[in-house]
Image (tube, rainbow, N blue to C red):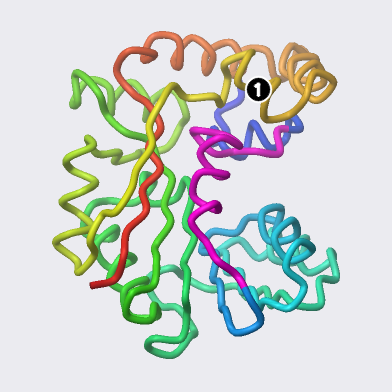
Amino acid sequence: MSKEMGHIFLRKLGKKRLRPGGKKATDFLLNHMKLDENTKVLEVACNNGVNLEMLSKMHPNTQFFGVDLDAKMIEEAKERNLENVEFVKANAVKLPYEDGSMDYVINEAMLTMLPNETKKKAIQEYFRVLKKGGLLLTHDVCIVNNEEQAIKILSNGININVSPLTKSGWFTMFSDNGFNVVDSLSGKLTLMNPIGMIKDEGLLGTLRIIKNGLKKENRGQFIAMRKTFMKLKNDISYIAIVSEKC
C-alpha cells in the first residue's frame, strides 16, 4: 500500500482544496480583509497559488505575496502569470520581508504540521512582518476530545507526524506570541466527507477524486484515510482564527 503523506496523496487524486475546513473556513477568513491599492497581503504555505489567483483577480490593485517551501508548488504558482502577485520559495520561520511590511498574513493547514516550538517561531515571524493592527488569518485542525490518542491516530492515518492543538491551545499559542484573537469559526472537517467535498470541489470534481482513489494503486491508502477521518469525526474539527497584532 502507498505511504505518501496525506496532503500529497489527495493532491495526486485531484483534490484542489487541501484545507481542513474547506471553502467555508477559507471564506470566513478572507471576509475579514479590506483590500485597496495600499494593502499588502502575504500567504504563507500558498501551495500552487489557488487562493492568491482568486484574490488577485478580484483586487487587481492590491499587492499579494506567496511563499511556500515546496519549489515545485512555487513554479506551478508562477505559471499562473499573475501581475500583482510575487511568488517566492521561502521558509515560514525566516520570511524574506521587512518588519511591519504586511497588512495581512494568511496561513492555512500548515501550523498543525509543525512541532510546537517551530509553530512559535513561525508565529513570531508572522508577528514581525505584520504592521501593528494587522491581521493573521489561520486555518488548522483542532482537537476536540481524546487529545493524545487523536493525534496519534491522525498522524498514523496521514503518514506524517502532526501537532494540532485544542481550541484553547490555539488561542494561547497566539496570545503568548503577541496576538489578540478577535474572531474564530470551527466545525466538522470537509477533507474526505462526501458532502463537504462536493461543496469544495463540486460534484464532478468529487466523483473524479473518488474514481482516482479507488484505482488499484490508490485504493488501500484512500480507504485507510477515509476510515481514519471517520474514526476521528468526534475528536477533531477544523478551526479558523482571526488574530490581531497588538
Query: How far across and down, in percent of the image, does residue 45 sit?
Result: 54, 59
Residue 163 horizontal side relative to residue 206, left or right = left
Instruction: Find out whether residue 142 is within the magenta segment.
Output: no
Residue 91 horizontal side relative to residue 168, left or right = right
Quarter in which the N terminus is drawn: top right
Q: Residue at x 34, y 39 (%)?
A: 162
Point out the residue furthest to the bottom here.
98
Residue 196 horizontal side relative to residue 208, left or right = left
Query: How far across and down, in percent of the image, does residue 243 sit?
Result: 32, 58
Quarter in which the C terminus is drawn: bottom left
Instruction: Find out whether residue 25 is within the magenta segment.
Output: yes
Residue at disc 1, secondary structure = helix
Name the kind of residue labelled 1 in the image: Met
Above or below for 148 versus 241 = above
Q: Nearer the viewer, residue 72 or 244?
A: 244
Query: How far across and down, in percent of the image, does residue 77 sit?
Result: 75, 63
Above or below for 81 versus 215 = below
Q: Residue at x 57, y 79 (%)?
A: 39
How packed is label 1: few (under 14 Cα within 10 Å), some, or many (20 or more)?
Answer: many
Q: Residue at x 47, y 69 (%)?
A: 104
Determine which residue is flagged by label 1. 197
Q: Nearer the viewer, residue 169 or 54?
A: 54
Q: Residue at x 41, y 32 (%)?
A: 238
Q: Which residues are magenta?
A: 15-35
Query: How far across and down, in percent of the image, does residue 70 sit?
Result: 60, 61
Give the image quarter of residue 186.
top left
Above or below for 63 versus 47 = below
Above or below for 194 versus 155 = above
